[in-house]
Amino acid sequence: MVRREPVDEIGLTLPIRETIAKAQDASVAVLEMIVYRSGAVVYLAARATGPGEPDGGRWPLPDITFDGIEATLLLGGRGGHGSGDHGGVLTFVDTFRYWLPLPSRRFRIEVEWPQFGLSGASRYFEPAQFQRAASEVLSPWQP
Amino acid sequence: MDGEPFEARSQAVYRTDNRDWGVNYSSVTLDPKTFFPPPPPAPPEEPRTPVPEWARPPAAELGTRLPLRQLIVSRANVAIVLTDLIAYSTGFSFGLEILLHEPWRADQTLLPSPRNEGVANALKVAVEFENGRRATSLDPHRAWTGKYPDPPFMQVLGYQYGTGQSRIRLGWWVWPIPKGSVRIELEWPGEGVPLTALELGMDDVRSASGSEIALW
């Protein structure tokens, strides 16, 4: 089974762009969900502000799960962008692209980020919304 | 002792043609106060330049995604789709997805270099407001100053490759939200894509721009 965006499909982007969980210095949000015939790409962003790690590194990434659905990380982790000030306070946005099989039951996205005291979940996403979108996938090529 | 003048004597010995050459340099008296003067005081910390509102989407807003998908170009070798329209309080962004029938090659040109090298074959994108004012992907870079540009202002936000280098996603930022509609124009001579335009009503963007959620 191919676990990435099919090259011959123009997916349908669901009108979803919302915060999953928010703490004082960190937040995780859904930026995009694009549905294809066989699955969906879910694009997430995690932003946090804080002092860097003592060894000069950055804090660990959040744990993201999909309520029991097996998701494949297409691209993610430390690909984000960031900035720092002279006091050593850093702000970084890390982004993650997951491939999900078309859901057959409702699901939500769960996030744990203990470094920032962040723990939460999105609302539930309904499978009907994905199946309807999958039926509206277009072909990019002219006949 | 610290701060006291000291004597420095250097001597070097060179060997040439089996003969020793001893070279004595004269003694030099150095004053460490002038030789290593104390460093000048650190300059006052300059205030960080905030990102002007016309340059980027507001960092504290997630924006509101509007349902949209419009196939703009469909040819044998390339398809271009408008996939995104996101409203912010100060402007909007739109996304283009480029699908290639064959994986991307090194001799293809997506965007020109900052000095507009490769511009002849590059993808060109423009937005035109109803009042006839335009911004294009070939406009010169603008420094982040307090001076506002003449609207509209357009800037590529980033791009990424996917699906085995056959799918490219490009995001564009446009400032401000216009009173009327917007026309998005594109041309990609290197891929045989002629000048193509798409008209977008902005009513939904204007309505949504007042409903941003504070993200962070």
Image (tube, rainbow, N blue to C red):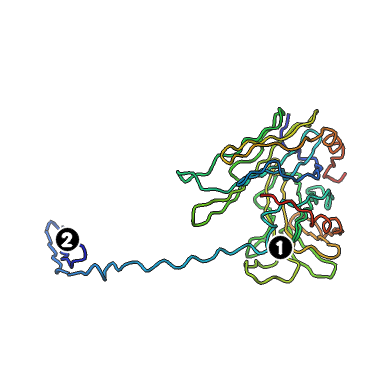
Q: Work out whether residue A79 or residue B116 is closer to the camera in this orientation and state it.
A: A79
**Which residue type does callout 2 highlight?**
Ala
The chain letter under disc 1 is: B
Q: Which residue is mark 1?
A: B120
Residue A126 spot, x, y in % from top left:
82, 34
**Which residue type does callout 1 highlight?**
Ala
Q: Work out whether residue B49 or residue A41 is closer to the camera in this orientation and state it.
A: B49
Question: What's the distance in space between the residues labelled 1 and 2, CA to CA?
Answer: 62 Å
Query: Which residue is at a point 65% across and 40% down the rendered structure image?
Result: A75
Number of marks present in the image shown: 2
Residue A48 spot, x, y in % from top left:
60, 46
Element on which disc 1 rests: loop
Residue B153 spot, x, y in % from top left:
73, 65
The mark nearer the N terminus, 1 or 2, is: 2
Q: Are marks 1 and 2 on the same chain?
A: yes
Q: Work out whether residue B102 or residue B43 is closer to the camera in this orientation and state it.
A: B43
Element on which disc 2 rests: strand
Q: Work out whether residue B123 or residue B140 is closer to the camera in this orientation and state it.
A: B140
Q: How crowded is the residue under tag 1: few (<14 C-alpha within 10 Å), some, or many (20+)?
A: few
The chain letter under disc 2 is: B
Q: Which residue is mark 2?
A: B12
Query: Which residue is at a point 82% across and 66% down the rendered structure image?
Result: B129
Q: Quadrant of the C terminus of chain A?
A: top right
Query: Which residue is at a point 14% across and 68% down the rendered structure image?
Result: B27
Instruction: Locate residue A117 relative to residue A99 in the image: left or right.
Output: left
